[in-house]
Image (tube, grey):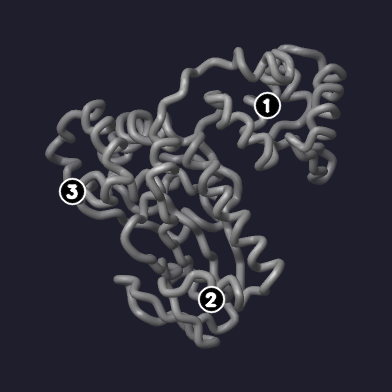
Amino acid sequence: MDTPTAETLLAMRLLGNGGGGQSFRRWQTAVRSRLGAPPSAQQRLFRSAQLSSDFFTSSAAGGHFGLSLVKAGYQREDIAYITNHFYPLAIVPYWNGIRGYLEAERSYRGRVILNDGVEGMLRSLQPMITWNAPVLETASPTGPEIHLNNRGLLIVPSLFLFDQVTVIKPPASRPDAPPVLVYPVPVNGTTANSLWQLAPSTDKALGALVGRTRAKVLRTLVDSHNTGELGLRVGVSAAAASQHTAVLREAGLIITRRKQNTVLHSLTPLGLALLNSRGIEPNATGETPDARRSVS
């Protein structure tokens, strides 16, 4: 899934339109100071965000930012500006907090599904949407009605989509693919202060809590790795990496899954929250866990 690409494009639109209210004012001021005036050729990018359904499906380009934009039809000059200038200055410094906030939102909606079913989850999104099976009604600029026709629906929360839900219909080449419903997550003053505060990039505090090597393991596992890869990145043997992951797994900070013949380790939401709470910058490129919710 390529959520950072979508959030980056929506952030450009928010910055260009000056939306979001007081909750985004601090971010806007800081980003404008870092960016300066955008090149005239790229100014149109700040007025609209052209999202592709491929950003939210398993067919997205493996989190490869530039390739995802190529597939969505963006021009080479625009892609260079987005990936080399806007994304590093406007998104990367805050991505740890953004990702944690969106993950908390996904976890909340997941609990609603477990407790109240899909119908209950859809009702929880009112008044942004109205569900009259099998038709979903929204105020999306792409059209007020979605006929699911047993295709399912991907529901994705967004921080920078501040104004209204957006429905992204599948391309004509894949008419049976599910549409994507992107909805704005509310941001209050307390959340905004947390999101836009740049914490020092140090793992000293976390190291004191769990040990320096395990702190490095947690930072590294923002991206999933097998035991051998983890050992190489952290600088310990595979056997030592296995011991550290066992301790962190027992503490609920990581999860281990078997994929074919490979064992992959990843952060749990608790592990990610611990990193965020200690102000640690992850050893990662910005790819986020799969944020999809599929309903039929």
Q: Report the quarter where the C terminus lies.
A: bottom right
**Furthest-front residue in view?**
190
Q: Which mark is residue 44?
A: 3
Q: Residue 52: give x, y in percent of width and height.
A: 40, 58
Q: Residue 151: give x, y in percent of width and height.
A: 57, 76
Where is mark 2, residue-wise?
A: 123
Q: Would you say residue 168 is visible in this rendering? A: yes
Q: Which image quadrant is residue 276 in?
A: top right
The front one of 128 and 217 is: 128
Asked whether the beta carbons under mark 2 and mark 3 sit within 8 Å of each other, the answer is no
Across the whole image, how many numbered discs are drawn on residues? Answer: 3
Closer to the eye: label 1 or 2: 2
Q: Which mark is residue 218?
A: 1
In the image, what residue type sits under mark 1? Leu
The residue drawn where x is 33% and y is 29% is 89
Closer to the eye: label 1 or 3: 1
